[in-house]
Image (cartoon, grey):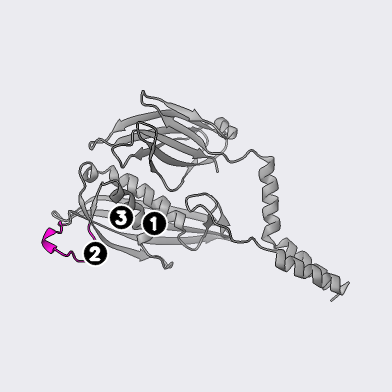
Amino acid sequence: MKHLLPLLALGLLAGCSTVLETGDRIERGLTPPDAVNYATTRPEGGFTTQLNDARIGNKIELLAARKSKTDGGYTRVQFDLRNGSYLRQTINVSFEWLAADGTVTESQPNWIVTPLEPGALTTVTATALKASSAECRLRLITR
Amino acid sequence: MNKFSLLACAVFIVGCGTPATYKDPQGRELVVSLDKVNIQDFATAGSQMLQSMVSSPSFSKGAPVLQLGTITNDTADNFDTSLLLSKLTVPLVNAGRVTLLDNEPAADPSARPKAEYVLKGKILEDRSNAGSTRQSSFVFQLTLVEVKRGVAVWTEEKIVTKQGTKNAVGF
C-alpha cells in the first residue's frame, strides 16, 4: 500500500490533461504563433496581402485573384493558391466581403480545411450573397 | 508517508482536468469528435453548399420562393437537421436572395406565394478503421427541385471526413 499510492499519483499525473496542455503551450511558445493572414482584392484589380504568420510566406504562394460578376450581378472571386514547399500543407481559408466603402457586408462563419500536396495548385472561389459586396478578403491560416 | 501519499493523490484528483470555458463557435479550438457530426461540420458543409447553390442559375436573379422539404438523417447520431439547413437559409433570407415559406399556415392562404423550389436532402455516414485509427465520413446531400417541372435543378454533395484515434480539440 505504501508503494501503491505514490504510483497511483504518478498514474494520475501521466493521464492528466492539464499537464499535457502545459506541454502544448511550451511547444507553441517555441514556434511562431498561428496568426491569420489576409489577401484582399482591390477595386482596380489585383490584390493586397497582409502577412502575419511569416511561416506561411515560405509555404503557400498566392498566385492570382480574379474578380467577376455573376449573371445576377453579384461579385465572384477566385484566389489561386500553390503549395510551394516540399511538404504536404493544410491551409484553412475563410472569406469576408466588403462594400465599396470598406464596411464588412458578409462573413463566412467557418474555416474550410484545404489540404495541399507539394506543388499542388488550388483555386478557392467565393460568391457574394449581397449586391453591395464589392471586394473580398481571404483569410488564411496554416493549421 | 501514507498520509503524504494520500494528500498527493487528492491534489492530483482535484487539480486534474481543464475547466470549462467559452469558445468562439466559429473559431478553431472546438472539439472534433470521431463518432458524431460536430457543430463546425454543419457550418463547413453548409457554407460550401451555400456557395454552390448561389452559383446555380436558379439563384442568379430575384428571390425565388423556397420551401424546405425533408432532410433525412441516416446516421447513427441523433441531431436536428435544421443545424445544416439554417447554414443555408439564414444567409439567403437575410441577403434577400430567397423568399422562404413558413411551415405554419398563413392567415390569408390566398396571399401565400406558391413554392417555386423545394430543398431536400439526406445526411449519411461511413465508418471504417485500421488498427486503432478510426475514420468517420459524413456525407451531406442536398437537391433543389423545381416544383413546376418536378426536376432537380441543383444538387450537391459534400463529405466531411475525420480520422484519428481519439477525439481532439482544434483542426
How far from the left and from the top, in percent, is residue A23?
Answer: 70, 51
Indicate left or right for A11 with A98 as reference: right
Disc 3 to disc 2: CB gap under 8 Å: no
Disc 2 packing (10 Å; few <14; some 14–19; many ≥20): few
Rendered residue at 54%/31% (across/down): A51
Q: Residue furthest top?
A: A44
Instruction: Please identify the dominant SS of the magenta region.
Output: loop
Q: Quadrant of residue A121?
A: top left
Rendered residue at 37%/57% (across/down): B84
**Chain of the residue on which disc 3 is drawn:** B
Q: Which circle, 1 or 2, is nearer the viewer?
A: 2
Task: Check residue A45 for magenta coloring.
Answer: no
Q: Which residue is mark 1?
A: B139
**Chain of the residue on which disc 1 is drawn:** B
Q: Which residue is mark 2?
A: B103
How far from the left and from the top, in percent, is residue B171?
Answer: 53, 50
Instruction: Tell me the kind of residue under disc 1.
Output: Val
Instruction: Tell me the kind of residue under disc 2.
Output: Asn
Q: Quadrant of the N terminus of chain A?
A: bottom right
Q: Magenta span covers which residues? A: B101-114
Q: Quadrant of residue B20?
A: bottom right
**Residue B29 or residue B37, whichever sits in front:** B29
In terms of sequence position, does the residue under pointer 3 or pointer 2 come before the other?
2
Q: Which residue is mark 3?
A: B142
Q: CA distance from mark 1 to mark 2?
A: 26 Å
Disc 1 packing (10 Å; few <14; some 14–19; many ≥20): some
How far from the left and from the top, in percent, is residue B46?
Answer: 37, 52
**Chain of the residue on which disc 2 is drawn:** B
